[in-house]
Amino acid sequence: MFPHPIADYCGYPNRPTLAYRNGYALTMSTSEGRKRLEPRMSRGSWKFRTWAAGPMVVISALLALNQLGSSHGWDPVSFWLYTALFIISVIQVLYLLRVRRNDAPFWDEDEARRDDWDRRGRRL
């Protein structure tokens, strides 16, 4: 990237940087300049992973609580294994929520690009 005198004059910290190709400045989209947390994840794969991780939290919590109220004695190894599984599942769900918050603009742009492509195809 080459320095741009007008962009350097404006001292805004959140200003978009300009990309140059063949001497011309390229305009940037709203989400460009930021990096995706999960570049290969689409909205559909996020939904699938969330539907897989959500029940895992509930199941692991029920298994850990079942070990506490067990009728044939308390097994500390199983309890701590199920508790660790519960903690890992909660961390996974929280990470997926963070990915959704960060990558939603990218997903929206991809869907808009696909819709535009479909609209152009129907015109032909």
Image (cartoon, rainbow, N blue to C red):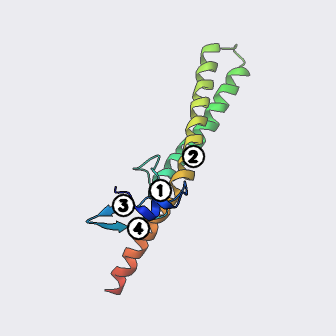
Front residue of this view, candidates 68 and 38: 38
Q: Nearer the viewer, mark 2 or mark 4?
A: 4
At label 4, the amino acid type is: Thr
Give the residue at mark 3.
19
Question: Which residue is rendered at x = 69% and y = 26% of the image?
Answer: 66
Q: Nearer the viewer, mark 1 or mark 4?
A: 4
Give the secondary structure at mark 4: loop
In this picture, residue 17 sits left or right of residue 104: left
At label 1, the amino acid type is: Gly
Residue 31 in sight: no
At label 3, the amino acid type is: Ala
Front residue of this view, candidates 21 and 62: 21
Up/down of 31 relative to 62, above or below: below
Residue 50 coordinates in the image, percent (x, y)? 55, 47
Question: Which residue is rendered at x = 70% and y = 27% of the image?
Answer: 65
Give the residue at mark 2.
98
Give the residue at mark 4.
27
In three-dimensional space, the C-alpha distance between marks 1 and 3, rounded to whole angstroms, equals 31 Å
- The numbered dot on residue 44 is 1
